[in-house]
Image (spheres, grey):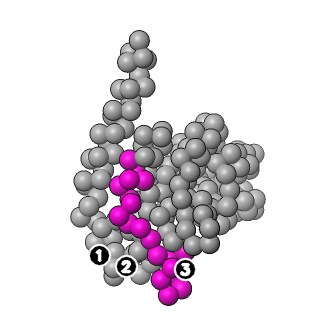
Amino acid sequence: YADVLQIPAFLCRQTDLLEAAAFTGKWINIKKGQFLSGNSMQFAVRKVYDAGNRNVMLTERGTTFGYQDLVVDFRNIPEMKKNKVPVIVDITHSLQQPNQVSGVSGGRPGMIETIGRAAIAAGADGIFIETHPDPASAKSDGENMLKLDDMENILKQLITIKNAMNRLLSPDHRK
């Protein structure tokens, strides 16, 4: 049983897949392709809506930067929020460095907290974190995972930032 169906970034433009996922009535998390702008995601959202499902969220997971790196363009967060859907930032996969380590993806896990803090400050509604007790022994994506022991600390930081942003942006604070 699944509560949310995730559309991988490389398949985010596949109409048949988006429609089939939409027909389930489940929440659909569409990961933004590394080759697309945040604004381009309106078309994926529209395909799911047109199939009768309004339960959509979008996930920023980085943009190709050169041949073997990804960067997060935080302008994509407000662009994707224009679709009136929750916007999530994948703060681990967005740090991948494709094909860096003997044909498998490398990563920059030391930047996970930085990307997370910036994502929340930029208005992300949530974060996606891939974690493992021992990333070095993970079967996949270990190079860009958060060590499970570090999860509580980063979540506390992000909640503190989210609460501060909520206070800062509240109507009472702006007076």
Up/down of 21 relative to 121, above or below: below
Task: Identify the residue shown where x is 35% and y is 55%.
Answer: 113
Instruction: Give the residue number, with chain letter if any, for mark 1.
Output: 134
Which of the two discs, 1 and 3, labels the residue nearer the N terminus? 3
Q: Disc 2 and disc 1: Cα gap in Å?
A: 7 Å
Q: Give me the C-alpha separation between circle 1 and circle 3.
A: 21 Å
Residue 112 is left or right of residue 96, and the answer is left
Q: Which residue is mark 2?
A: 138
Q: Position of residue 1 (x, y in %)?
A: 48, 62
Farthest residue to the bottom: give it.
102
Q: Is residue 113 above or below residue 169?
A: below
Q: Amino acid at mark 1?
A: Asp
Q: Which residue is mark 3?
A: 99
- Residue occupying image coordinates x 56% and y 51%: 73
Front of the two marks 1 and 3: 3
> Residue 155's x, y, as percent?
30, 50
- The type of residue carrying mark 2 is Ala
